[in-house]
Amino acid sequence: MAKHISETPATQFLRKHGAVFSEHPYAYEEHGGTAASARALGVDEHHVVKTLVMQDEAARPLIVLMHGDCKVSTKNLARQIACKSVEPCKPEVANRHSGYLIGGTSPFGTRKTMPVYIEESILALEKIYINGGRRGYLLGVAPHTAAALLQAKAVQCALKDIK
């Protein structure tokens, strides 16, 4: 019998909008990041998408969806979204904006509505694995479904993460 997974604001949001998604619980690894979740699910880290809560120079929050194996070029992002600068929010600020804990941040069902930017190459993937609103819990969803529901704007700001 499958383990029952309790609802999160993210799954409630997706169900309310009739989105098709799969649920993928895994053993959360502190500081394991997308490499650990990709390994646990047996998928390419490039298909695991990070939800990053950032802010512009006026401290207005925004969300960036990025490949697990890439970093965000904040300079390129700022230029594309017509901001002076963009930087990651401090964890406690990100928690306040999203309503989620770091390591469990989902772009769906956030406490505050924030503009969402998605790395354009994510849209070329067939399926992405994105946080479901809890540590150790990813959702499989078509990237175009996610982008449409989030009204995400495509940007090009990925930097290959050299490990």
Image (cartoon, grey):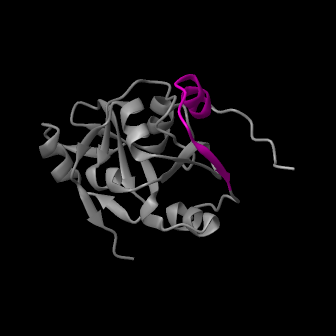
User: Quadrant of the rendered structure where residue 117 is?
Assistant: top left
User: Which of 50/99 is in front?
Assistant: 50
The residue at the point 52 percent across, 61 percent down is: 33
Q: Position of residue 115 (x, y in %)?
A: 31, 31
Left or right of 94? Residue 84 is: left
**What is the residue that sits farthest to the right in this orientation?**
1
| Above or below for 136 versus 89 | below
Q: Position of residue 40 (x, y in %)?
A: 64, 66
Q: Position of residue 6 (x, y in %)?
A: 74, 36
Q: Position of residue 27 (x, y in %)?
A: 70, 60
| Above or below for 14 versus 118 | above
Left or right of 61? Residue 77 is: left
Asked if residue 21 is among those painted magenta in the image, a careful observer would answer yes
Asked if residue 3 is among those painted magenta in the image, a careful observer would answer no
Left or right of 62? Residue 42 is: right
User: Quadrant of the rendered structure where residue 144 is?
Assistant: top left
The residue at the point 26 percent across, 50 percent down is: 120
Magenta segment boundaries in residue numbering: 9-25
| Above or below for 36 versus 90 | below
Q: Quadrant of the C terminus?
A: bottom left
Q: How many marks?
A: 0
